[in-house]
Amino acid sequence: MSDRDPIREARQQWVDHGWGEAADGMAMVTSLVRAHQLLMERVEGALRPHGLTFARYEVLRLLSFTRSGRMPMTRLGSLLQVHPTSVTSAVERLVKQGYVERLRRDDDRRVILAAITREGRDVVEAATASLNAQVFTAPGVSRDDVLGLTELLGRLRSASGDTVITTP
């Protein structure tokens, strides 16, 4: 591990090349992308023993939160804020693993539902326990920093068009 901060050095390069007005923003975006990479390594490490990726975990977790354990594929994509192709791919893998079934809605056979199986419920509970223990309970900064960062990222998301509702 190097004792040099490549993002700080890149920021200085921005300043040296006459892009000083963009240097702080570049450093923020690059830091955010790097933090995302580091957190995803931890998340994927916690999920790997369960045979899940984060995308598949999110599908299972969302389905498990519904009363019926099923949801139209289009609604899944909307709630997860991903392209329909990504949902289809994740659901296909979950079907192969036996964690999800594809069903047709009785009242409209055109609607395809994803439905969590008993095995899917079991694996999502075990995976959630791993994520809570290995990542979410101790993400790497203090609780106050977690709350502040979440609020700050909410402002960034809101400025980019996301609906963000702050809680008291």
Image (cartoon, rainbow, N blue to C red):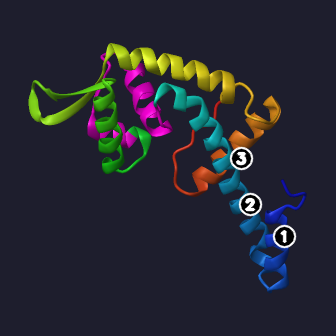
Q: In whole angstroms, how far apart are the C-alphas of marks 2 and 1?
A: 13 Å
From the viewer's perspective, is residue 160 above or below residue 74? below
Q: Which residues are magenta?
A: 52-78
**Nearer to us: label 2 or label 3:** 2
Mark 1 lies on residue = 9
Q: Give the amino acid type for the residue marked by disc 3 in the picture.
A: Leu
Most extreme residue toward the right is 3
Mark 3 lies on residue = 152
Q: Give the amino acid type for the residue marked by disc 1 in the picture.
A: Glu
N-term mark: 2 or 3: 2
Q: Quadrant of the C terminus?
A: top right
Image quadrant of residue 106? Answer: top left
For the residue labelled by badge 3, is the local secondary structure a helix, a strand or a loop?
helix
Image quadrant of residue 128? Answer: top right
N-term mark: 3 or 1: 1
Name the magenta segment's main secondary structure: helix
The x, y position of residue 60, in whole percent, is 41, 27
The x, y position of residue 13, in whole percent, is 81, 78
> Which label sits on residue 32?
none
**Nearer to us: label 3 or label 1:** 1
From the viewer's perspective, is residue 64 above or below residue 90? above
Label 2 crowd bin: few (<14), some (14–19), many (20+), radius 10 Å? few
N-term mark: 2 or 1: 1
Residues at marks 2 and 3 touching, judged by CB atoms closer than 8 Å: no
Residue at left offset 53%, top offset 27%:
49
Residue at left offset 67%, top offset 30%:
135
Mark 2 lies on residue = 28
Answer whether residue 25 is magenta in the image. Answer: no
